[in-house]
Image (cartoon, rainbow, N blue to C red):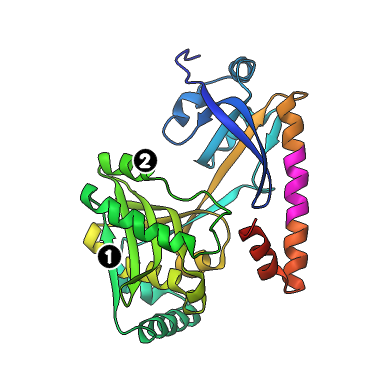
Amino acid sequence: MNKNVNFQSHLFLLRLGLFKLFRIKSTCITINQTNIDIYKEYSQSDIDKILSKVSYLKVDDIKLDLNLIQKIESSRSIYKGNNSNQINYFINLDNGYDKYIEAMKSKHKKELRREVRRFYEAFESVDIVYFSKQDQVSRFMVDMQGIHNNSWKNGTLNELEINTVNGLVNIGSWLGVIIYGNGNPISYMHGRLSKDHEYLLINNGYVESTKNLKPGKVLISKIIENHSEFDIMSIDFGSGSSVYKKIFCNDSNDIYSSLISRKLTKFSLLFSLQIALDTLYSLVKRTSEKLNLDHKLRKIVRNR
């Protein structure tokens, strides 16, 4: 077993949907695509030795590897964000923009063109601005903050920190994009641009009052249309099953993400509690959508 294992401090966040209940200090070891090959060599006994020293293993969006997953899951407590392995949707632009649009479903193509046209008709001027350099960070952060403060996310989700942006700028892998209407920031995207020409979207938002104009979808469509400007060959939306991902994305990977601890520990009990809270939240969400109460609940959360 490789003894040079990095133990990390971590805050286990117990939550009910968007409501943060409390944080618990913990230690973990993170397994991701950058170090997965090391852990493939570990035996179940090796993994048990690691788990005797930390609160849990944190597995972050690894491409499906059944042998490893079976090994680390064996006779242990597991928490997943959902009940099955997630789907990681992305846009493959290897064949260029024209081929991408040509392959899009006809109804989605018509809908997207209509929404882009409506957005542009709503303003006298529309500008798409790309940010990637250190001297552009200040403007991006100010305009992003303005969007965030006027979006439904305000007060409910962690907003983008300047240290995060500066860290990506320093290694030359940051790309932020904002769409402006009549000079006002309307919607933003922020992400990491890898050496493999992949754009990983990390944060996004739009001004709530412009929701009917679909500013987020318009911005994504323009990033796709102008992908060659930054040599983007794929756009990664991460896991989840949002409708807009299924409209835009033409490719996907199965990914695996979880927290794993020994059984009969404090954290195994917390995993069980979080699963119960997730189930409750899903029930409330489905019920509110059926009763058309979801927007009212969002306002309650937003004003919390």
In the displayed structure, 16 sits above or below 119; it is above
Query: Depth check: 143 or 41 in front?
Result: 143
The magenta span reads 273-281
Q: Please tell me whether the stretch drawn in magenta is mainly helix, strand or loop.
A: helix
Residue annotated with mark 1: 129
Question: Going 50% across and 22% down the picture, which residue do you hit?
Answer: 41
- In the picture, measured across the screen, residue 232 lies left or right of residue 87, that is left
- Amino acid type shown at disc 1: Val
SS of the residue under disc 2: helix
Residue at 52% x, 38% y: name it: 60
User: Residue 43's x, y, as percent?
Assistant: 58, 19
Foreground: 59 or 153?
A: 153
Which residue carries the number 2 mark?
163
Classify residue 236 as left or right of residue 167. right
- The image position of residue 124, as x and y in percent, is 31, 85
Q: Which of marks 2 and 1 is nearer the N terminus?
A: 1
